Structures are given as C-alpha cells and as structure tokens.
Amino acid sequence: MRINIIRGQNQIGGSIIEVAFDSTRILLDAGSELEETDPVAPPIDGLFLGNASFQAAFISHYHGDHIGLCDKILPEIPIFIGKAAGRVTNAARAYMGKPEYRFSGFYESGKPFIVGDMVVTPYLCDHSAFDAYMFHIACNGKTALYTGDFRSHGRKNFCALLEKIPQVDVLITEGTTLTRSPARSVSEVALEQQAFQILSQTEGPAFVLMAGTNIDRLVTVYKAARQANRVLLQDLYLAAISTAAGGNIPRPRDFLDVRVFTTTGADERYEQLKSYGNARIGKDQIANLDQRFVMCVRPSMRTYLEKLSKLKSFDNGVVFYSMWEGYKENPDMANFLNFMREKGVRIVSLHTSGHADGNTIDALVEKVKPSVIIPVHTENSAWFSRYRDIDIVEDQVFSF
Ligand SMILES: [Zn+2]
Ligand SMILES: [Zn+2]
C-alpha cells in the first residue's frame, strides 16, 4: 500500500490523501485550505485534471477543509460521504444559493466498501461536524486507519468506537489540538450544565453564536434551554440544517419548544418560513412570548436584532459565544459583540473543541497499536515522538 499525503501534513486543514495499491487508487478527503473563500484545486493529474485515475473519493465529513474541493473532482470519479452528512451539507449550500455537491452514493458505518483491491470500512465518530467518519483500509494483507477529525468529549461513546476498530499497521491521525489545548477537553455534557446554570440565573433574553453545522452544540443548547424552560429560536438557515439532519436532532415542527424565524422579508425566505407551519414565529410574537427564549444568532442579524430590541429590552440578557475564541478578532464578530454589549447583554464563552485531546489520541494509539503513525491536520507532529516504539513518518509518501 502506498499512502501519499498530498496536502495536510504540518498544517491544519486542506486535507487531500491518496491511498494506492497496484492499479487501485482512492482519495480520502478533498479539502480546501482553511479561510480559503474561493477554493483552488492543486494540479493533481487524474484527480482534478487529465484522465480520471482514482476509482473513488471518500469524504470523511462536511467541513470545508475536508470537502471544499469536492466539486473540482473529475466527474468520472464517484464521491461517497455519510448519508446525513450529505443531506446537511447540501441543505446548507442550497440555503446559501450554492450548487449542491454531487455524491454518487453513501457509505455506512461498519459496512465494508470494496474498491478494486481495497476494502474501506467507515466508522462513525464524534466531531463538531455531524455524521463524521474514520476510514479503515485493508489491502494485500496490510491495514491503515485514517481518523479524519474526531474527539471523545462529544455525545457519542468513544469506548464503544474503540472496541469496534481493529489493530492496524499504519495510523494516519489528526492532532489539531496538540498545540493549543489542555490535555483533557471539556465535554458537551459539561457545557450543557454550564449553560443551564447561566440561563437559570439570567432574567433577560439569551442568544447563542455558534456554527450552524455544529449539530452537537445545537443539541447542547436545546437541552439547556429545555431544562431552563426556554423556547429555542432557530433562524431559517439553522432550521434548514437541523431539518436535514433529522433523527433526534432538535428542529422546528417535530420538537417541543423549537420555533423558526426569519430576519428578512424577502419572498423566497418568507415562502420557506411558511413551510414550517405553526412552528414559525414573527418578531412581534417573539417580543411578546410568555416564555423566555434562547435565540440562535449570527453577526449578519444586527439590523433585525436592533428592531427586536425596540420591541423587547435585551437588558440583563446573555450571549453564549460558542465558537473558537480566535474568531472574536474578526471585525464583523467584534462589532457584533460590541453591539450586543451596548444593548445590555453580557458575553459568556461556552465552547469546547471539535478535536481529540492528547488523552484521546493516547487511547486510540493504545487500542489500534500501529507500528507507524503519520500525523496530519496538526502543527505539532513532534508531539507524537512520545510513542517510543512507533515510527513517526513525516515524509509525504510512505509505502509498506
Ligand atoms: Zn479538519
Ligand atoms: Zn472537521
């Protein structure tokens, strides 16, 4: 087997990995660089240009740094993703007026997928993107595991996942947090308790700033809101995503105390709002709700919130800042937070990483017992030298 980390070594994001044996060639992830607004595909023959020479592309999850170049892949190459992940990402794209991604099919957790000489088995894992997977690859008597992005402090049982994953020869693992976080991350459940406590001590309205596609966080916020007897208000974008996620994800219509609002009166948006029936809610109704609320917001909603604050005071309110701290330096975000402060709302950070902490990576290594580790999606490959009996490979291409 030959593993070629085309991109994503010694950097976070932009992951593109080729696995090949004989004439079988597959792709794991087709990510754009972080913060790349108009992604450009690197000139990779057989993948993005020339004659297609990959038999399949497997996307681990819908974050741009893993899927962002998906629409640049040659049309002859089939692309596979988890079913719910495919629905969520295309719902988000449709809402933003972007063309949907082309998926040829959907893989399932634990079900082997045969491509030429290779058997690819996806394993559902926990991450800040919904329906994210690791990939186990077996070929010619050799095995490898690619983790994609994962963590153990979300709502999925990490021990149960570890029990399913077999030992491998080579582990390709992410190490995102190894430069920036403590060894053990705060869990989503702990965030939920923290949010509930703050909500129960807050007289005014509550707001949440979070990534719309961070479904685990949406569950955390909903559970805290329910315990505090508050209505959860999702804007149309979030409602489109939660509805696409389906299952036990809190969304308007199917869940108690989840309502949907729009910040614009544009015809298209109004039609979308109408489709939610009685779950929709207008500005005046929000202002006059008997129950208090938790409203999901974004910096672009400033004009709407200005109007809402005229109908209902934001005094003694709270904004949960539920994203990476670094985004606070973004001018739009900084302005928005100042605007909310001026309305009498305090800002409280409520966040935990979507990525594995050091202890989690230790547990995975202990379980799969690789003889080789290829660190990816990290700025601190040196961290892995702690595993004295394991070869740490930092070359772009590794054959075994
Ligand atoms: Zn990533
Ligand atoms: Zn990710």
Image (cartoon, helix red, strand yellow):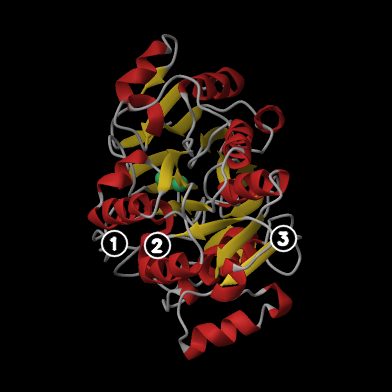
The residue sitting at 61% across, 66% down in the picture is 105
Is 362 or 202 nearer to us in this picture?
202
| Residue 241 visible in the picture | no
Q: Amino acid at mark 3?
A: Asp
Q: CA distance from mark 2 to mark 1?
A: 8 Å
Q: Position of residue 72 (x, y in %)?
A: 35, 68
Q: Are marks 2 and 1 in contact (CB under 8 Å)?
A: yes
Using a 10 Å C-alpha cutoff, classify the residue at mark 2 as few (fewer than 14 neighbours), some (14 to 19) or many (20 or more).
some
161 left or right of 386 in image: right
| Residue 158 visible in the picture | yes
- First along the sequence among labels 2 and 1: 1
The secondary structure type at the circle numbered 3 is: loop
90 left or right of 123 in image: left
Q: Which quadrant: the C terminus?
A: top left
Q: Nearer the viewer, mark 1 or mark 3?
A: 3
Is 382 or 239 nearer to us in this picture?
239
Q: Give the total of numbered labels.
A: 3
- First along the sequence among labels 2 and 3: 2
The residue sitting at 42% across, 79% down in the picture is 97
Q: Amino acid at mark 1?
A: Asp
Q: CA distance from mark 2 to mark 3?
A: 51 Å
The residue indicated by pointer 3 is: 257
The residue indicated by pointer 2 is: 53
The secondary structure type at the circle numbered 1 is: loop
The residue sitting at 58% across, 24% down in the picture is 368
Assess mark 1: CB under 8 A from ligand 1?
A: no
Q: Position of residue 252 (x, y in %)?
A: 68, 67
The residue indicated by pointer 1 is: 45
98 left or right of 81 in image: left
Using a 10 Å C-alpha cutoff, classify the residue at mark 1 as few (fewer than 14 neighbours), some (14 to 19) or many (20 or more).
few
Q: Position of residue 141 (x, y in %)?
A: 58, 34
Q: Position of residue 321 (x, y in %)?
A: 43, 45
